[in-house]
Amino acid sequence: MNRPRSAPTDSGQFDLFLPYVADMPLRDQREMMERPFFSLAKSKRVKPIDYTSPDGKLWVHVSASPEYGMATIWDADILIYCASVLADMARRGVNDVPRKLHLMPYDLLRAIGRPTTGRAYELLGQGLDRLVATTIKTNIRAENRREATFSWLDGWTQLVDEKTERSRGMTIELSNWFWEGVMMQGGVLSIDRAYFDITGGRERWLYRVARKHSGGAGEGGFAISMPVLFEKSGAEGEYRRFKFEILKLAEKDALPGYGLSVETAKGGEPMLRMRRIDGKDGAERGLGIHRQAQDDRAIEEMPPSKTAQPELVEGPAKPPLATKAGASGARPAKPSKSVSPGKHPAGEFSAAKHPTEQRMREDTIDASALIRRTVSGLSDTATRGFMADDTIQHLRETCPGWDLHALHADFERWVNADAARLPANWQKAFIGFVKRHHEKHGHTLRR
């Protein structure tokens, strides 16, 4: 749908590319989590989705392009990444958070748990096409209009270097409806990184429903009747088949962070109860009931943005998310960095693992470890985990021709492999890393 566009090699626009990598705190748009906006099947779907809420007040109509098919729940991973970027920008106080994002496909694929093979890049392009081609009509957050009509993306463009024919990243233009939904206060919810490990479409959808309804519902969780759940899914096929599949998922009970159980309602139809269980099946510890509720409150308490103040027709979300940092109760989010497989990024654990509390709990203190933790904190607050604009400009002048984002990811992996490698000055250490790489491998570059 969008052909690669050449970009001038001397353009400074690439300094604007987002330096986010795989451990950025994840956010999902609240309204997308409980309504049927996506196909749950990997096979091409052209049959539209028509949904009306049980009270008849809200409706959603999703139509697919015959050529590309309907956007799938796997394509929604791209939107989760974009929502996470926007929410993080707002939390950090970025003025005029944009609808058009400049990013590297490599970073996007890593952030959503995908491989970075040629096939993965091809599938990414197909997913972006479906997000552009799928049309949604709804009265959810239509404000003074009877309905809103939009696609998830207004467009996307791949940028290619004219001389080397290498990818220089891409731009993704988000629809205004999606952007406003993320930026409004309370418009996003934190989700577990283990979500990307879920393979089945119904399981992925069920996780999002569980997170939306029972993430902060307390120990009792949330129960929903099977017929209502069927309508919320927008799934193709008969209700009987859907019920059979959901009962199998409940028996399997493998959603990360949520327990599933079946209850019998008065009418005889089963009800599905979903409860938050901290640390279950690979879920991140520290993102349990109390942590998620605290995190959601922090998002809702952030001061309103000056750039978007849409009214919400449904749900508990309020006016727009903050564009100023330092709001009361907000969880600090560090600039992103790579983490080795099986490890969680700093800041995603419970507060008990903060160095200050550790010092209070330990009878003896390793002085070198204490200094290392202190330096680590200062480094995180300053420039750890990303490339500063000056760093990018300097390296493009002194070590031209390299994919700095890929090298930065390699550098992060090297640092994270050993805590003792953490540099006090991230930018200087990365510059030295690239220069050594350039000296060793510069002869392999195509001139």
Image (cartoon, rainbow, N blue to C red):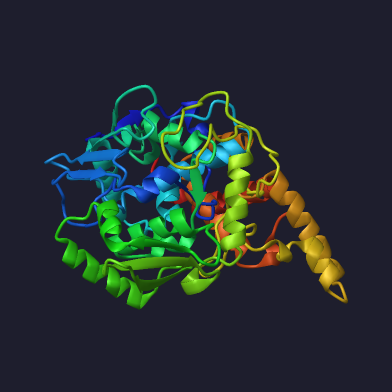
Residue at figure coordinates x 63%, y 46% from the top left: 298
Q: Nearer the viewer, residue 204 or 167?
A: 204
Residue 187 is left or right of residue 33, and the answer is right
Q: Position of residue 231 (x, y in %)?
A: 25, 53
Q: Position of residue 181 (x, y in %)?
A: 44, 36
Quadrant in the rendering for residue 152: top left
Residue 121 is left or right of residue 320, and the answer is left
Q: Quadrant of the C terminus?
A: top left
Q: Quadrant of the N terminus?
A: top left
Question: Is 149 situated above or below 430?
Answer: above
Quadrant in the rendering for residue 198: bottom left
Q: Position of residue 354 (x, y in %)?
A: 74, 61
Q: Nearer the viewer, residue 66 or 299?
A: 299
Q: Position of residue 201 (x, y in %)?
A: 28, 60
Whether residue 11 is visible:
yes
Whether residue 345 is visible:
no
Q: Nearer the viewer, residue 247 or 13?
A: 247
